[in-house]
Amino acid sequence: MLFVGDDWAEDHHDIEVQDEQGRVLARARLPEGIAGITRLHALIGQFAGPDTEPGEVAVGIETDRGLWVMALRAAGYTVYAINPRQVARYRERHVTSGAKSDKADAHTMADMVRTDSHQLRPVAGDSAEAQAIKVAARVHQTLIWERTRQVQRLRHQLREYFPAALEAFEDLDAPDALELLAKAPGPARAARLTRAQVAAALKRARRRDIAGKTDAILAALRVEQLDQPQPVAAVYAATVSSLTVIIAALNGEIAKMEQQVTACFRRHPDAAIYLSQPGIGEILGARELGEFGDDPHRYASAKARKNYAATSPITRQSGKKKIVLARFIRNDRLADALHRQAQSALRASPGARAYYDEQRDRGLDHDAVLRALSNRLVGILHGCLKTGTLYDEATAWSHRAKFRVPLDNQSPGVPLRTLRPGTKGQAGACPDRTRAIPCTVRAVNGVPTVVRTAASVPVACPIGRSTPGNHGHSRTARYTGSPADMQADPLRQPTF
């Protein structure tokens, strides 16, 4: 085997080739482009034996994308994308002085792929469709982030000299707000806007209650306020006009890129699986698919996918001290998509909502629970992709042993709050009383149903609401009747 370290720069690559014993066979500085990759192939061919396969050439480089990496993978080499922090830490094993050079980095990466390749992750073999989705989704998200920056700059300018505009327009990136600010970027011109101009802008933006909104905008723009000196106000007005043009252009480009993202995403064979997940639409699905990739061998297990997504916690332990922390060194684009999915899943998935409520009851804060929920959803997604099946609510949450069955003495037969067929556990939490009921949920004609098999089941039940004289004291209730009666009426009320 041959081991190649490649320290890349914008216009050149420092290369070192080693054999299995760590002997340096060659060093070179190659130009970027076709000429450089041709010389690299020739250099490797000098030392490769007649029986050496392309996969027996291991290349370490500090990036996983670009034309150079694509050419290396097309040649059949095994390419390892190494994090620059890993390279820096590995360098410190041999050099403690802090010295650094491009040639030394190439040597370090060649050593890493020779001795620690089992600890490194090869560049994923994602399909061209997945790479296209990744590019489109990233550009779309970058444009949104850039629009947010420009809107914040616009808000800052208006706050300095035209605060009435902030009262008049809730969304500064809305088409009607941009149109009116372009026509009247300052207080004096805004006060001269006519009702017809404002109503026409609202109509073009397809707003409702045009008459009411027109009155509110005109009233806000015509209120008296403190003014900047005329030369300063003129510069501020020019700045606002410029920013409105930039934001309007970004709105148009975002809409175009959204169409591109959805078109690429719909063509991918895994799109149906992503769309079946709770809380995922086409844009979030495209972002997650692009960042996760579609190489079926990239993630050995659900844990590996969770670690890559940075939803799983990290543990630091030394002696008697042990702490569990969230991961903050992560792919921010993927983390943002998963966080948004978790928020949406609270409304789309009863299982996700029950898990969220359970963790909140334990005292965890909102962000920590959303991270935990994201971790669960990543594991569910991994299982669906591995088996090629769509998301199923009952299957996704059937592994959780505890579930809740709301009971109400005044309303027998209340539907299940959380449905987990095939599981056993205790249930409780109704509006007035809590009953812990050992039971089994089974699918009867496709409907999850509580089934009890014992003729007498003890139930611990707090009586009534908490009062100064009754702090949730419980009595024991027993179910009476035959097992057949309980099968027929699974929500039968206990008798005290």
Image (cartoon, rainbow, N blue to C red):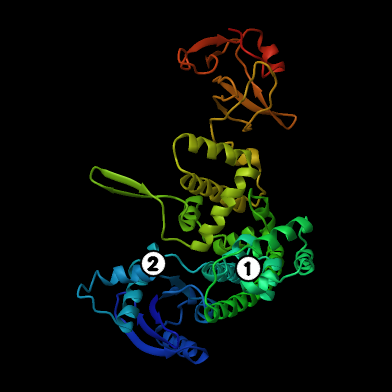
Q: Could you tell whether 343 is left or right of 266 in the image? A: left
Q: Quadrant of the C terminus?
A: top right
Q: Quadrant of residue 80?
A: bottom left
Residue assigned mark 2: 117
What SS does tag 1 mark? helix
Q: Amino acid at mark 2?
A: Ser
Percent across and percent down for residue 206 are 78, 62
From the viewer's perspective, is residue 423 above or below residue 489? below
From the viewer's perspective, is residue 2 above or below residue 293? below
Q: Quadrant of the N terminus?
A: bottom left
Residue assigned mark 1: 133
Residue placed at 56% from the left, 69% from the top? 158
Badge 2 density bin: few <14, some 14–19, many ≥20, Cα 10 Å? some
Q: Is residue 352 visible?
A: yes
Residue placed at 51% from the left, 75% from the top? 65
Pick whichever, 239 or 125, lies toward us.
Answer: 239
What SS does tag 2 mark? helix
